[in-house]
Image (tube, helix red, strand yellow):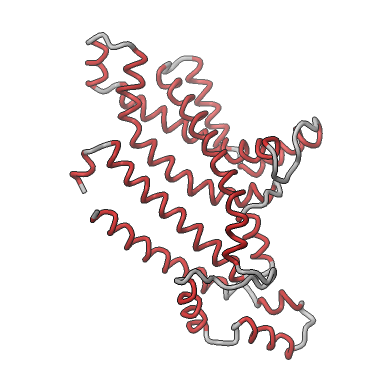
Amino acid sequence: MIFVIRRLGELVLVLVSISLVSFAVLRLTGDPAIAILGPDATDEALARVRAELGLDRPVIVQYLDFLGKALTGDFGNSTRFRQPVLELFMERLPATLELTLAALVISVLLGGTVGILAAVFRNSFLDTLVRAATLFGQAIPSFFLGIVAIIVFAAQLRWLPAGGRGTFAHLLMPSLALGTYYAAITARFVRGAMLDVLNADFVRTARAKGVAERGVVVRHAFRNALIGVVTLIGLQIGNLLSGAVVIETVFSWPGIGRMAVQAIYTRDFPLVQVTIILSATIFVVINMVTDLLYRIIDPRMRVAT
């Protein structure tokens, strides 16, 4: 309970800091009134729009007003869509979560399975092939892999749609483009963690007692390597959310990342702010859940903290 209370306090501190930094930095990117009316607008028209948006007040007053309303769930209205930004965020969130979870499944299942096989068959041809493939997977940027996939499978072969959302065919290319890099990281991490555990004394003891190799790998080795894997998965979820920004743009995927990019171009400050703050909230909560899982997997950590 003390751990949870402490982490909740850290959560509040982090979110307030993020809101302050994002609020200040966004004000340095330009004038939303010019983005709305255009560069040829008169000074009178620009002043009127700034007054309507509350941008004519001191920045600290604007921030305190924003923070006070945000605590009640009111993040303001989009200057572009003239709708509450929280509603716009929640409309796009399912698409981003769908893409992120699909990429995470690819990362964990593909990377985890390949990493375990490479560790079990260490120094074999399969291990060499896996190590080469993981280096290749980490070297290729996700957006480049996505563009190549569009050219080959959408433009040339016409097997899959080039963009949009709706069916499994729409999800396949963006999730593979996003998940391949993290699958390579997962495979290398799992391989290293499994090798460390497979060389441990308790694993040799289990083999000496006649435990089947499958039982040694699954019940003994992988269970003890799982703590590091849980850490990696927790970090990957946050990285996948941020990486989805580029992939959503490449594949015209209607998620919060693509929406945020468009909001930045139009200087829609309230929409950018709600995206940053709520995305950060999701990331911090995931990290807190990951820490809690540590204590379930390894009871020794409960005593340590």
Count of marks, rendered view? 0
Image-based side of 195 in relation to 277, left or right: left
Q: Could you tell me which residue is drawn at 76 percent across and 38 percent down?
A: 161
Q: Is residue 212 visible?
A: yes
Q: Is residue 121 above or below residue 13?
A: above
Q: Is residue 145 visible?
A: no
Q: Is residue 205 above or below residue 69?
A: above
Figure quadrant of residue 35: bottom right
In front here: 184 or 293?
Answer: 293
Q: Could you say where residue 83 lies in the image, as x and y percent from the top left?
A: 65, 69
In front here: 15 or 124?
Answer: 15
Q: Could you tell me which residue is drawn at 45 percent across and 77 percent down?
A: 68
Image-based side of 15 in relation to 106, left or right: left
Figure quadrant of residue 189: top left
Q: Residue furthest bottom?
A: 44
Q: Is residue 57 above or below residue 153?
A: below
Q: Could you say where residue 85 lies in the image, as x and y percent from the top left?
A: 60, 66
Q: Could you say where residue 232 lies in the image, as x and y percent from the top left?
A: 42, 40
Figure quadrant of residue 284: bottom left
Q: Could you tell me which residue is drawn at 41 percent across and 21 percent down?
A: 119
Q: Could you say where residue 122 lies in the image, as x and y percent from the top left?
A: 41, 18
Q: Residue furthest left?
A: 303
Image-based side of 131 in relation to 176, left or right: left
Q: Could you tell me which residue is drawn at 66 percent across and 35 percent down?
A: 172
